[in-house]
Amino acid sequence: MIVIALALASAALAALSAAGEQRAASRLAGEVRRRVPRPAPGAAEDPRQRSVRRRVRYATGFAFALLTTPLWLGSWIVDGGSFFLQAAALHLGSLSVVQPLMVTTLLFSIPLAALGTGRRPSLRDWTGAVGVCAGLVLVLSTRGSSTTDTANYPTLIPAMAAVLLLAVMLVVLARGRSAPVRAAMLSVGAGVLFSVGAAMTKLTAGTAVTDGLVGLLTSWPGYTLAAVSLASFSLQQAAYASGPLAPAMTAVVIADPLASYLLGVVGFGEPLPELGAPLVLAALGMGILIAGVAMLAQSPLLHPPRVSGQVPASAPADTATVDPPESDRVVLPAAVAGRPCAATGCTKGT
């Protein structure tokens, strides 16, 4: 029960952090955009150079504004607490339990978004929430009896390598696709990378507990965690910038627990459901969980409107580049997926 409590607490803090960071980012985006000077009429400057210059000015100003905003900084501290709770849950428990539970970040985000916007959750939102809860109950209650929870490196490392290769293939295949397909493929790539990050978090937490800071600094899991976290964060940003949010969010939230479950079974000896009714119920639960996530990901509460005056993405390059990044329009980031957001430095406006 302590593992479940830690995972749920981590998910709740992740949702709280996401709400705070998104609110801070959305408030600052318009202000920073208005500060970026527009080119003088008739200025003899290449449009591409002007576009790049404005983009750099906006990004620099936006980052500085975030770093000097108490709400955003406080949300980052909360996000760090969420990461450490998740690391503790992974150290004490298993990937196949903790990572599916991190999906509940969506559940906590709905009421937080409702409080922030003054709108009530719709029947679709409640139905999705019930689906997520019911799916989690079925998936977690049908696990087989645990035999071991230690890393089996001869199988774990090839499994993680296969996941990394899958992510690379998805990035390559996403080129030239339509916006929704490209966003979904990149999101699946980010989600499976998050599962590798979760496995590395489990190994890193174990190293920190047994060998302390010296062992942590002289072993490979921590450095691998940092590299994978940066890659998954960057890929998720690309996914959110490539197409509609709903399919991207749905794909990343679903891909992480599925890949984590498989990594747990292959790399840590975690048990599969027994054949027969338990396996059928587990598959049914996963289907219900996926349907619930898809419904919640499309909730209007998780899709804040554009900042006033924001130029559509289809606008010409010399005007579109003054837009705030995708971060001010997205409530949920890597935290929803399975993180570790605190380790990546992601803003919940991802």
Image (tube, grey):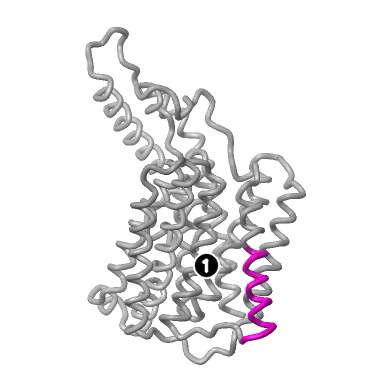
Q: How many marks?
A: 1
- As helix, strand or loop, the secondary structure at mark 1 comes to helix
Residue highlighted by disc 1: 257
Q: Residue at x 32, y 30 (%)?
A: 55
- Please tell me how crowded label 1 is: few (under 14), some (14-19), or many (20+) other residues with Cα within 10 Å: many
Magenta residues: mostly which secondary structure?
helix
Asked whether 78 or 261 is in front, the reply is 261
Q: Residue at x 68, y 51 (%)?
A: 111
Vertical arrangement, residue 26 with respect to residue 290, above or below: above
Magenta-span inclusion, residue 106: no
Q: Quadrant of residue 80?
A: bottom left
In this rendering, position of residue 232 left or right of residue 50: right
Q: Which residues are magenta?
A: 275-289
Q: Is residue 43 left or right of residue 107?
A: left
Decide whether residue 277 is among the magenta residues: yes
In the image, residue 134 sits, relative to residue 337, either above or below, namely: below
Tag 1: residue type?
Pro
Front residue of 263 and 329: 263
Residue 267 lies in quadrant = bottom left
User: What residue do we see at 42% from left, 52% from top?
Assistant: 186
Give the percent coordinates (x, y) of residue 142: 65, 81
Q: Is residue 291 above or below residue 135?
A: above
Please state the horizontal and vertical placement of residue 240, each as a whole percent of the image. 46, 45
Quadrant including the N terminus:
bottom right
